[in-house]
């Protein structure tokens, strides 16, 4: 089973790195959030539009390692059309999973893929980068 998880981890990361979802610059978006890790140089901008209490559109652009780019791609897919009030629990669950390796698997199997990141301390920040930036933005809002 461990080998299967490793293969899944690699496949999801590689696919989202190769063809990220919602990868588009939108400087005219209502909110532009910077996600930056000065230690490794990963840097993304998250472009968010809100309609009422929902995410109307979410895209990102920038550069980083395969893990941070794939994680950001999965984040963008998971927040499309979501109510703002749903975001804190979504982000907290993902961030706890990455940090602690909690076994509470998210419903989205691609999010669950990043459970493996807790085994690689240098990759935790990569997996969490954009999720933490969005969480910080939500907190400061």
Image (cartoon, rainbow, N blue to C red):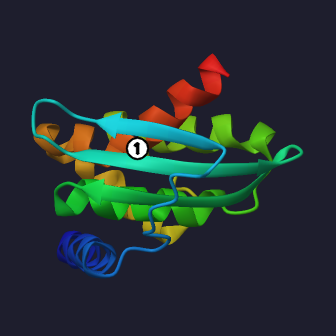
Specify the farthest residue to the top: 140
Residue, far front: 28
Left or right relative to 31: residue 85: right
Q: Answer with the quarter of the image where residue 98 lies.
A: top left
Element marked by disc 1:
helix
Q: Is 41 left or right of 85, judged from the image as shown? A: left
Task: Tell me: 95 left or right of 44.
Answer: right
- The quadrant in which the N terminus is found is bottom left
* Above-or-below relation of 41 to 56: above
Q: Position of residue 140 (x, y in %)?
A: 61, 18
Residue at x-position 52% and y-position 41%: 32
Q: Quadrant of residue 67?
A: bottom left
Q: Report the label total.
A: 1
Q: Residue at x 33, y 48 (%)?
A: 44
Q: Does the image show residue 101? A: no
Viewport quadrant of the C terminus: top right
Give the percent coordinates (x, y) of residue 24: 45, 68
Question: Which of 13 and 133 lies nearest the eye of the viewer?
Answer: 133
| Residue at (15% x, 37% y) in the render | 121
Point out residue 5 in the picture as x, y percentages from the top left corner: 27, 71
Reply above or below: 3 against 73: below
Foreground of the two, 102 or 26: 26
Horizontal and vertical percent for residue 34?
40, 37
Residue located farthest toward the right when viewing the structure as drawn = 52
Q: Circle 1 sits on which residue? A: 130
| Horizontal arrangement in the rendering, residue 136 relative to residue 52 (left or right) | left
Q: Residues within 10 Å of mark 1 (few under 14, many from 20)?
A: many
Q: Is residue 30 visible?
A: yes
């Amino acid at each position: 089973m461990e080998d299967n998880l490793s293969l899944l981890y690699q496949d999801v990361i590689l696919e989202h790195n190769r063809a990220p979802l919602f990868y588009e610059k939108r400087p005219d978006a209502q909110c532009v959030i910077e996600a930056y890790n000065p230690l490794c140089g990963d840097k993304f901008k998250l472009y968010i539009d809100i309609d009422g209490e929902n995410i109307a559109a979410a895209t990102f652009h920038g550069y980083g390692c395969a893990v941070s780019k794939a994680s950001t791609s999965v984040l963008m897919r998971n927040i499309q059309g979501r109510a703002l009030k749903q975001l804190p629990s979504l982000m907290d669950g993902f961030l706890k999973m990455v940090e602690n390796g909690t076994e509470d698997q998210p419903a989205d199997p691609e999010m669950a893929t990043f459970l493996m990141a807790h085994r690689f301390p240098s990759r935790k920040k990569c997996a969490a980068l954009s999720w933490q930036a969005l969480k910080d933005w939500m907190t400061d809002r």
